[in-house]
Amino acid sequence: MITATITSKGQITIPAEIRFALKLGAGDRIAFEMAPAGGFIFKPAQKMAVTALKGMFAKPAKAVSIEEMNAVIAKRGASAGLAK
């Protein structure tokens, strides 16, 4: 059995053997799921490539210029009492 010790800040160091088996590196995220029989399942959080987001949103019906965006923002800000 592989064990780890919890620090006073609630942190643990994942033993190298487990990091290598799960292909974990610095900055990777970990997911904890409650197991049906109690306890928790520990696994790498799902990684999603930015390219997976392509096509998630439809193209706008018409293009809007920066000037048009700024005008709408200013109008909404003024109507909300945020104008200076």
Image: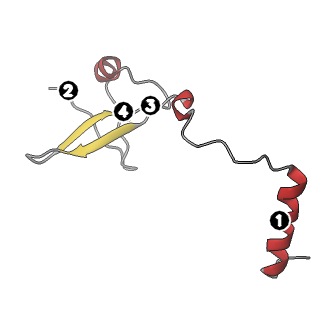
The label number, if any, that marks residue 50 in the structure image: none
Q: Determine contact: label 2, label 3, CB under 8 Å.
A: no
Q: Secondary structure at mark 3?
A: loop
Q: Determine contact: label 3, label 1, CB under 8 Å.
A: no
Q: Of marks 2 and 4, which one's residue comes earlier in the chain?
A: 2
Please identify the quadrant where the N terminus is shown: top left
**Residue identified by numbered label 3:** 47
Which of the 4 quarters of the picture holds residue 25? top left
Q: Secondary structure at mark 2?
A: loop
**Residue identified by numbered label 4:** 13
Q: As rendered, which of 31 and 60 lies closer to the eye?
A: 60
Q: Secondary structure at mark 1?
A: helix
| Distance CA(mark 4)–CA(mark 1) | 51 Å
The label number, if any, that marks residue 72 in the structure image: 1
Please identify the quadrant where the C terminus is shown: bottom right
Q: On screen, 65 above or below 17? A: below
The chosen color scheme is: secondary structure
Q: Residue at x 44, y 31 (%)?
A: 47
Q: Nearer the viewer, mark 2 or mark 1?
A: 1
Which amino acid type corresponds to the residue marked 1 in the rendered image? Val
